[in-house]
Amino acid sequence: MISTRGSGERLDREELDTLREAISRNDVDLVLTEDIGRICRRLDSLKICEHCQDHNTRLIAINDYLDTSSESWKILGIMAAARHEQYNEDTSRRIKRSLSNRFTQGGIIQTLIACYEKPEGAKNLSEIRKFPEWEPIVEGIFDRLENDWSYSEVADWLNEQSVPTGRWCTMKTWDCAKVIRVVHCTMLKGIRTRNKKVSKRDNKTGRRKPVNAPPKDWLEYPCPHLAFVSAERYDRLIAKLKEKNACYRAGKKNGIDNRLGRSKKRTVWPGQHVTCGVCGRNYVYGGNGLIRHLACRGSKEYKCWNSISFDAELASHKIGSAVYEQIATMPDFADVYAACVRDELNQRGDSREDRIAAVRKALAEKNRHIGNIVKSIEDTGGTPALCDRLKLLEEERKQITRQLEDIEQESQDFQSLPSFEELRDLALKSFQDLPRESHEFAKIMKQLIPTIVVYPHRALDGGHVVLRAKFNLSLVPLLPVLRKLTLDLSVLMRELTVDLFEVPQRIEFRERIVAMIGQGVQQRETAKELGITQPAVQRALKLDALMNQSGTADPFIPIFEPPEDYGRLRRHKHKRFKFEPLPPPND
């Protein structure tokens, strides 16, 4: 007896493989079934019959009057397979029709998100209530997402507030997926939806997977008593989140997985934020066996010769200190900044009325088209093509309406732009109030410093190969409205270089050593006064002579290939090594 609870459409069931193997081994003389649809569906059921015939095994399907020992079994098998497929489709349509009818009457109440209460025995949407204590929570979620918080950061905030995940969640802590599920629930704006997904069969395995349904099949049911936010605010936020997260959507671009290199977890800064200047790959924790060091991913894969790592804690301190010092001592560009803002306001004031007029004209034109289609539907009863066209026009009208609201809100934002001193104080306060190991600090740093690129360097007189970080510091991301300025805001940007290593004594004290020697102080006395060794003084003088000879003020020079006299860079000599730099981001 072989029994199964799986769908007859599934062709990768273990029981089906067991049956085939038993027939192939000639272990059975007879296969008896109620109908061949119990074994599998479609023409694959005929293949089972042919497999039985090949191994002298008789198959009998009682309800299909099919017996492979008779000469007419093939015709009966084809008819039975077609009949079962037709019955399956008819049953599916009937169930979908019944469920859709129940939905349009407020039925099919199953599980709900945490902010709604389902009384015992409730069968209609009118019986569902929302928890009043969730009003400030939903407001807080929307406020944070509108201020560019990530889903994970909102989840951390909910966990800190000890917000329950809901009656139907087995996990009692919030994560990214739970926040997405709540935010994308249209009941928050007072509309319940259904049929946005349909199942599609993979004919090779018989498995079904969800795919997006055509808009004409979507169902909506109004439930204003369950709304937490206005429909306009909800639609605006969802559109913003889709645009913001479009670059992270799973898929391929030009044959390359766009998830490649994307962080699967949040690491302590500067993890997942540093790029190798040699090959273009990101730096990851675990460099050269040290878990707190960052090293180039390409060197681990034998695709980059730059195997130099750096201490993440030291780098965080050095980069953070450099950024803080630059912000705190930034020259007073208040006049230049004010002039930029004033010119921008004048320029936008001249074009604002024209833009508003153009958008309102497009909105009126769209409303006219919608009115014509609505009248056609009222006169003729409507066709599927007209209904699809109406939904498309309504979606375009929503986009135009949001565009008009953005222009009006943009004008208000520019009128309330802070002064340069307020912007600088905002940056310093954001920087001071957060611990360096927190994810909030990482978020601020990634806003201030979009990209950190490290390059290998070496002193003129030799020694260890070290890393220098180069990045652009920008105050613009602290105030999102500044990103909309069309004028040059380079006044708010600085290019910085930070050494990600402890500076050797001969380089740290070089200038002081040269000055003291120039005043006639002996080398031994100089070393004693500075608290260093005499050989360090001698090496500093030698380095200074090399710098004067080369005509440079920087004791370090960049290296573009591994030095032959440096034994720690040997990755390029391995037989698996093949230098494969990534193409520049613009390619």
Image: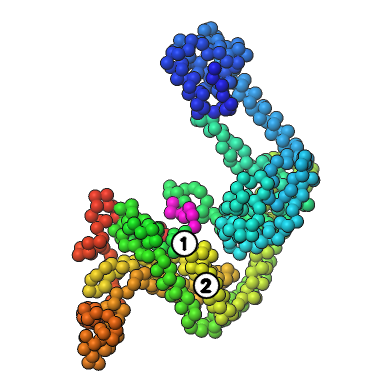
| Residue 414 appears left or right of 551 | right
- Which mark, residue 435? none
Q: Residue 494: where, in percent of width, then height?
A: 45, 75
Whether residue 166 is visible, yes or no, is yes
**What residue would you read off at disc 2?**
431
Q: Find the distance from the CA under tag 2 to the CA under tag 1.
A: 16 Å
Q: Which residue is pictured at 69% across the width and 43% down the height? A: 111
- Quadrant in the picture for residue 535: bottom left
- Would you say residue 265 sits in the magenta stretch? yes
Callout count: 2
| Residue 464 appears left or right of 450 | left
**What residue would you read off at disc 1?**
268
Q: Secondary structure at mark 2?
A: helix
Relative height, residue 274 to residue 208 (above, below): below
Name the kind of residue labelled 2 in the image: Phe
Q: Which residue is pictured at 69% across the width and 34% down the height? A: 96
The single residue placed furthest to the bottom in the displayed view is 519
Q: Which residues are magenta?
A: 260-266
Tell which circle, 2 or 1, labels the residue nearer the N-terminal end. 1
